[in-house]
Amino acid sequence: MLILKEPIKPTQKEITWYTADAGDGKRGRCGRTAPQLNGQYPTCNPDDPAAHCCSNGGFCGNSKVRMFQVNQVRVFAMQEHCECQGCIDFSKQKDFRWKPAEWWTFTDNSTNIGRCGPDAPRLLTGKIPKCDPESQSACCSQAGYCGTGDAYCKCLGCVDFKANPSYEY
């Protein structure tokens, strides 16, 4: 867990991240999986050099792609906070805010992840689930599953949410 010794003074007026005095389970958390802060998903302090990025797991930090060698072959380790799929670098995107998810998430119901369309179970909001347009599985197939490729993106009745993020069923 990241706890700052000295607070990092932000350059922006509105504090949209959990500060060091936040309760357990909140400090260092960000994104859709973190408890909301003032009705919004928390961000990371863009001015904090140690924690300006939000990982796709919902934690602030600053780690990037780590590269190492095995038998003189370059291998990339897991991407952690700044450069991974779904990660946000708030030092570069200070105004980024998450919109409410319109797809099944692990915290909502893990058994429904990847389900989409009119025949999929409805979201807790009552809406028909879409596919995350920022994910690698942004298309909804006619069978009601998120994925990639022609069977998910180009078929009759399929929806490509990356190309049409505002599509409504």
Image (cartoon, rainbow, N blue to C red):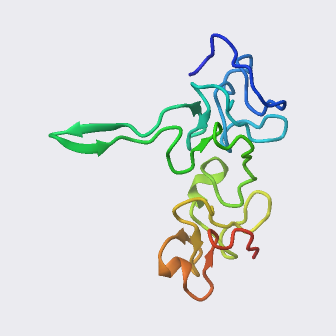
Residue 56 lies in what quarter of the image?
A: top right
Question: Between 101 and 116, which is closer to the camera in this rendering?
Answer: 101
Q: Residue furthest bottom?
A: 156
The quarter in which the N terminus is drawn is top right
Whether residue 105 sits left or right of residue 73 in the image: it is right
Vertical order, 109 against 31 (above or below) = below
Residue at horizontal 71 percent and vertical 60 percent from the top:
102
Residue at horizontal 84 percent and vertical 40 percent from the top:
39
Q: Position of residue 108 (x, y in %)?
A: 67, 51
The quarter in which the C terminus is drawn is bottom right
Question: Between 118 and 14, which is closer to the camera in this rendering?
Answer: 14
Whether residue 73 sits left or right of residue 11 in the image: it is left
Residue at horizontal 63 percent and vertical 85 percent from the top:
157
Vertical order, 62 against 118 (above or below) = above
Vertical order, 103 against 24 (above or below) = below
Q: Residue furthest top?
A: 5
Residue 48 lies in what quarter of the image?
A: top right
Q: Residue furthest left?
A: 71
Q: Position of residue 141 (x, y in %)?
A: 56, 77
Q: Position of residue 156 (x, y in %)?
A: 59, 89
Vertical order, 51 against 159 (above or below) = above
Number of disc labels:
0
Residue at horizontal 62 percent and vertical 32 percent from the top:
52
